[in-house]
Image (tube, grey):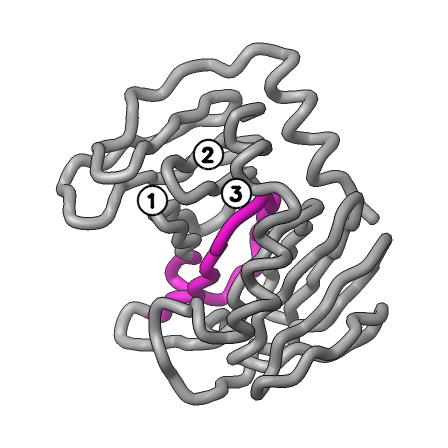
Amino acid sequence: MAALQRQSGSRILLAVMAVLGCVLPFSVAAQSPEGCAVAALRGPAMILRDGNTIRVQAGTALRGDDQLVTGRRARLKIACRDGVEVTIGADTSISMRMIGEAGSASRSIIDLIGGILRISLAPQFQRDRLELRTPTAVAAARSTAWITEAGSASTAVFVIAGEVAVSSPGREHTVVLPAGFGTDVAAGAAPREPVRWGPARVEQALQRTDDP
């Protein structure tokens, strides 16, 4: 996790600001993010929307094409009506553009471009599942809580409660993580077999995604 933290430092914020929304891997029309809004905020954070930069405040409503960027030492908590809560750590960038898309499989999708976040799905979560995509991995669940950290070369996933299925783009192999276990996914490789994370690594991940 420490290596990933170095990869996803403040350069993510600078790179995203430099290219605005152009780093997004897909292009879709704006969609409603199911009543998602900023529930709490500590430190600086911005929304990249329609080529503009908007400073985030508590209560800010989110659109389906928003890209959120947090600054150094920041925390940002998002709450959605459909039972999704996302706590974003410092120096992190995520795309909210598809969080409200139902599609044929009734999925919610979040793109973690770089950095670290924690997701909690309430029992009343209204979709078939939520998918979190990173440059090297896909994590999917229906009712659980987990932490993901992504850099350009690898992704780490740790499950707090429930189970999460982790795969990598273009590969059929999937691992299922129970609570207390994690995996690392390198670019172009299948996820490693689940391992129980040590107390120090767990504590660091929890501290970096604590509530604002």
Other-residue count near label 3 (Cα within 10 Å), few / some / many at <14 / 14–19 / ≥20: many
Q: Position of residue 166 (x, y in %)?
A: 33, 39
Span shown in magenta: 106-130
Count of marks overlaid on the render: 3
Q: Secondary structure at mark 3?
A: loop
Residue 174: image quadrant is top left
Q: Earlier in the sequence, mark 2 or mark 1?
A: 1
**Mark 1 packing: few (<14 Cα in 10 Å), some, or many (20+)?**
many
Q: Position of residue 167 (x, y in %)?
A: 27, 41
Question: Dot 1: what SS?
Answer: loop
**Mark 2 belongs to which amino acid?**
Val
Asked if the residue at tag 1 contacts the one at tag 2, i.e. Cβ–Cβ closer than 8 Å, the answer is yes
CA–CA distance in space, label 2 to label 3: 13 Å
Residue sitting at x 63%, y 12%: 199
Q: Nearer the viewer, residue 24 or 110?
A: 24
Name the residue carrying label 1.
Answer: 137
